[in-house]
Image (cartoon, rainbow, N blue to C red):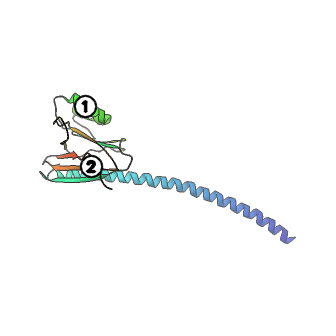
Amino acid sequence: MFGINTKKAMGVGQVFIFIMAAITFSLILIFGYKAIGGFIESGEDVAFIQFKEDLEDSIKSIYTEYRAYRLETYSLTGEYEQICFIDLDYADDDKAQLLLELRKENVLAASVWQDAAEYKDADQNVFLIPIAKVPIKVHNIEIYQDNVSSGIDLGFDCLDIRGSSFQMELEGRGDKTRISLQKGIRVQN
């Protein structure tokens, strides 16, 4: 009799152990999935902050070096499709037409530029699509477009981001940094 009860007890005990193992495995799988998702999101946030700091530092560091040139490559996470820069100090008699042009490229940038013209203050002059989680404002910039067919400077420039990277030429002007987005150049990662 002693041997038969032991076997039944072992069978019930094994079922209980299998159930506990399945529950433990499921919990580990669920929490692991959430943790990995959090790590990926944190990594993207760190990559964005690194991009923001690199952009701000490179523009601010060259402005005092008159006529110094640098070609910089910047990397973003793959979610961003476009970047726009606006010159908040840009002066033109026909700003209404320029705002219409910018509104075609980036509605948020046009709104901020219009507010900056009215209130002489803005906390952002770099815009991303989709909208960045944190506003980006770089040191005084001047937009240079050598590819404008009309020969006029628009005070803003936008670039479609391909391959999560883009290039920009920086020129120190003494009191500001002149930027020129490198259109049509595919950056090798």
Neighbour tally class for label 1: few under 14, some 14-19, many 20 plus, Cα within 10 Å: many
Tell me the kind of residue under disc 1. Answer: Leu
The spot of residue 18 in percent (x, y) is 69, 61
Residue 91, located in which quarter of the rendered image? top left
Mark 2 / mark 1, whichever is N-terminal: 1
Decide: is 137 above or below 13. Answer: above
Residue in the image at 56% along x and 54% along y: 30
Decide: is 167 above or below 124. Answer: below
How far, Cα to Cα, is label 2 from label 1?
A: 27 Å
The spot of residue 61 in percent (x, y) is 19, 53
The spot of residue 48 in percent (x, y) is 35, 50
99 vs 63, nearest the viewer: 99
- Give the residue number, with chain letter if any, for mark 2: 185
Residue farthest along the right direction in this orientation: 1
Tell me the kind of residue under disc 2. Answer: Ile
Residue in the image at 53% along x and 54% along y: 33
Residue 96, located in which quarter of the rendered image? top left
Q: Is residue 30 left or right of residue 107?
A: right
Nearer to us: label 2 or label 1: 2
Residue in the image at 21% along x and 53% along y: 71
- Give the residue number, with chain letter if any, for mark 1: 99
The spot of residue 115 in percent (x, y) is 26, 32
167 vs 4, nearest the viewer: 167
Neighbour tally class for label 2: few under 14, some 14-19, many 20 plus, Cα within 10 Å: few
SS at badge 1: helix
Q: Which mark is residue 44?
A: none
SS at badge 2: loop
State which quarter of the image contains the N terminus.
Answer: bottom right
